């Protein structure tokens, strides 16, 4: 009970000064009325007897005075706006924003991953597991091939993100690879997030080298570092391939080094790719901030209703007495 009372406060405590208003009206205001005109009534004695004007006024009893002051105190208490401050509810606020930058070029359709699945199918399966394990992060998605596009905003809605991951298809935005442009779009997506105090992380996955970027990958990495975005890179696919299909390992390592991230190489194996995502999950622990929220619950209606109830009882009691008289 004491804890409950300690959480009660008044929004307008200064209204308590109105308690003394009836006393001011009684003791400081003049009670006499000046008679300015007189009327001569020849039959005044008969009128006094008929109307019983010589009877003594009914004195206010102690009970009536007590009820008056009780009603007045309740009305003043209601005017002071009592409130109950609820115990704080602690909410976990994510403090890490993550953008997944995934390659969906034509080469991701190659069916050379162990288990008979395409490269993109293996990526989708491993990324879904990573997203499911990062419930306390805000995560967005950027896809790239010949062009780079933001495919999901940075948010806590993991279900919507999983749906977008399932919608990925090889060649959906072209056949080439624009690594620099994709990194630039990812940095812009992170830079537009609402919580500027959250740490920013981008994870870049590709199976080829840069063939279509308008923004040089090295310049994009410097842009990421300038905006305090750490970039982890994952090279996926056959490292022994040649030409445009060969992963540019030095470029991936350089991007990670410039931004303070790490670089991984995953062979054509879903298990190897899962292992990389698990390592990333391990080295990027969950960052959350606990926030306490309290609500002000108004209580003024209770003294107001009680005062109105007493006034109704007084009116009913007076009516009954007058009828009985």
Image: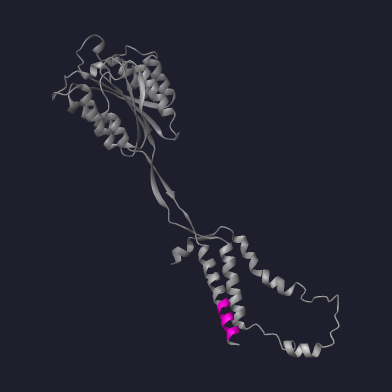
* Residue 42 coordinates in the image, percent (x, y): 85, 87
Quadrant position of the N terminus in the picture: bottom left
Question: By what rule are the colours in the image chosen?
Answer: one colour
Please give left or right for residue 285 compared with residue 20 in the image: left
| 49, 251: nearer the viewer | 49
Q: Does 74 appear above or below 225?
A: below
| 118, 54: nearer the viewer | 54
Residue 312 occupies quadrant:
bottom right
* Residue 19 coordinates in the image, percent (x, y): 63, 68
Residue lying at 60% horizontally and 83% vertically, measured from the top left: 322
* Residue 298 coordinates in the image, percent (x, y): 50, 59
Q: Is residue 115 magenta?
A: no
Magenta-highlighted residues: 314-323
Residue lying at 27% horizontally and 37% vertically, measured from the top left: 133
Q: Does 12 appear above or below 65?
A: above
* Residue 306 coordinates in the image, percent (x, y): 52, 70
| 111, 167: nearer the viewer | 167
Total marks placed: 0
């Amino acid at each position: 009970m004491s804890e409950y009372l300690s959480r009660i406060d008044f929004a307008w405590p200064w209204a308590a000064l109105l308690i003394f208003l009836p006393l001011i009206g009684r003791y400081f205001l003049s009670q006499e009325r000046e008679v300015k005109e007189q009327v001569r009534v020849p039959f005044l004695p008969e009128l006094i007897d008929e109307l019983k004007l010589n009877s003594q006024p009914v004195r206010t009893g102690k009970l009536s005075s007590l009820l008056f002051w009780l009603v007045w105190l309740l009305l003043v208490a209601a005017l002071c706006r009592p409130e109950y401050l609820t115990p704080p509810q602690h909410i976990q606020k994510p403090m890490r924003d993550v953008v997944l930058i995934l390659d969906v070029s034509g080469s991701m359709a190659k069916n050379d991953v162990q288990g008979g699945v395409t490269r993109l199918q293996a990526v989708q399966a491993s990324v879904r597991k990573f997203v499911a394990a990062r419930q306390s992060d805000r995560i967005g998605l950027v896809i790239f091939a010949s062009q780079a596009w933001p495919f999901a905003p940075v948010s806590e809605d993991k279900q919507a993100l999983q749906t977008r991951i399932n919608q990925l298809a090889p060649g959906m935005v072209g056949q080439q690879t624009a690594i620099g442009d994709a990194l630039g779009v990812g940095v812009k997506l992170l830079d537009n997030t609402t919580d500027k105090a959250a740490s920013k992380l981008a994870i870049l996955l590709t199976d080829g080298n840069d063939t279509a970027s308008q923004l040089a990958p090295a310049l994009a990495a410097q842009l990421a570092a300038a905006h305090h975005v750490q970039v982890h890179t994952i090279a996926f696919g056959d490292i022994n391939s040649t030409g445009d299909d060969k992963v540019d390992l030095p470029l991936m390592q350089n991007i990670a080094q410039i931004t303070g991230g790490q670089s991984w190489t995953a062979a054509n194996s879903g298990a190897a790719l899962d292992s990389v995502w698990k390592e990333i999950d391990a080295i990027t622990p969950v960052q959350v901030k606990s926030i306490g929220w309290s609500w002000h619950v108004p209580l003024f209606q209770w003294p107001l209703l009680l005062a109105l109830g007493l006034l109704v009882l007084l009116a009913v009691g007076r009516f009954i007495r007058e009828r009985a008289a």
